[in-house]
Image (cartoon, rainbow, N blue to C red):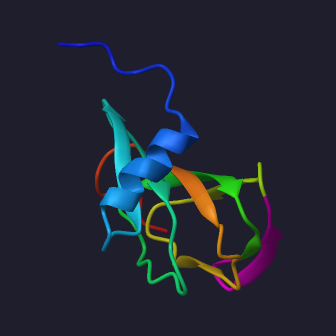
């Protein structure tokens, strides 16, 4: 089995996402329980709670992040943690918003 890539260039991630015209995300890496995607919603963020913990790292853009009723501003370079099964979404985000998202841990995760 080949070793996973060590570097995931943002420009390459954007190019792959552009090919997925109807998708808001593209998976770029998978190893063990870790999955890394580039997430770039347009207009609205229709996410539903996920079954694994996740960590976002904002690559570009800004806006507001809502989780469990708490609203916080975010910008480039910010890291955002969301535990499995927590309702969350991005709101009022700029047109250039994109974030790396890392899902990890077992499917099902721990319920809140």
- Overall secondary structure of the magenta section: strand
Can you tell which quarter of the image residue 36 is in? top left
Q: Is residue 67 magenta?
A: yes
Residue at 68% across, 86% down: 69
Q: Is 32 situated above or below 99?
A: above
Residue 17 image position (x, y, % from top left)? 39, 57
Residue 70 image position (x, y, % from top left)? 74, 81
Q: Is residue 15 visible?
A: yes
Q: Is 94 situated above or below 77?
A: below
Q: Is residue 5 magenta?
A: no
Residue at 53% across, 60% down: 83
Q: Is 72 situated above or below 15?
A: below
Q: Classify residue 61 as left or right of residue 103.
A: right
Residue 27 image position (x, y, % from top left)? 35, 48
Between 65 and 39, the one lying in front of the other is 39
- In magenta, the rendered stretch is 65-75
Question: Residue reaching furthest left?
Answer: 1
Between 45 and 48, the one lying in front of the other is 45
């Amino acid at each position: 089995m080949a070793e996973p890539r060590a570097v995931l260039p943002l420009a390459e991630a954007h190019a792959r996402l552009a090919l997925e015209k109807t998708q808001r995300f593209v998976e770029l890496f998978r190893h063990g329980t870790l999955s890394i995607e580039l997430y770039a919603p347009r207009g609205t963020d229709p996410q539903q709670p996920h079954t694994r913990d996740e960590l976002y790292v904002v690559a570009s853009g800004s806006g507001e992040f809502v989780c469990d009723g708490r609203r916080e501003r975010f910008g480039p370079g910010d890291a955002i943690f969301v535990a499995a099964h927590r309702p969350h979404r991005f709101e009022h985000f700029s047109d250039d918003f994109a974030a790396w998202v890392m899902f990890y841990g077992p499917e099902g995760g721990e319920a809140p």
